[in-house]
Image (cartoon, rainbow, N blue to C red):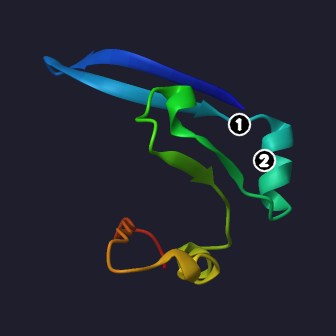
Amino acid sequence: MLKMYATVEENGETRRLVIFGLSHGNIGRLLNGDPIKFRGETCGLPPDVDVMIFVGENEREMAKEFAQFVGPETKVNVDPKLDT
């Protein structure tokens, strides 16, 4: 996996951009049910942030799989245009 961090200008505003590049091997791993997890600081995020990338059939199935992490502080964002 390629992890990059950049600072970009967008509409006169400076924004931080984090970019993840997945290899075919990474995609195969995800499709086999093996999430990818790493420390956020490896790509410019604060040291107390970890990142997990996973794949699922749809948003509803992914939510079921990770229900154990849901608590009062959990924030879940699903684009309303997507089929859940």
Q: Residue furthest left?
A: 12
Q: Dot 1 lies on which element?
A: loop
Q: In front: 71, or 61?
A: 71
Q: Quadrant of the N terminus?
A: top right
Left or right? Give the position of 19 relative to 30: left
Residue positioned 43% across, 33% down in the render? 45
In the rendered structure, are the residues bearing label 1 and label 2 in contact, judged by CB atoms less than 8 Å apart? yes
**Percent x, y for residue 76?**
38, 69
First in sequence: mark 1 or mark 2? Answer: 1
Circle 2 residue? 27
Q: Dot 2 lies on which element?
A: helix
Mark number, residue 22: 1
Quadrant assignment, res 10: top left
Above or below 23: residue 16: above
- The kind of residue on which mark 1 rests is Leu
**Percent x, y for residue 47?**
46, 36
The 10 Å Cα crowd at callout 2, few under 14, some 14 to 19, many 20 or more, is some
Above or below 60: residue 78: above
**Percent x, y for residue 57?**
67, 73
Left or right? Give the position of 54 relative to 5: right
Left or right? Give the position of 18 relative to 9: right
Q: Residue furthest front?
A: 48
Q: In front: 8, or 69?
A: 69
Above or below 69: residue 43: above
Residue positioned 40% across, 35% down in the render? 46
Residue positioned 77% across, 55% down in the render? 30
- The kind of residue on which mark 2 rests is Ile
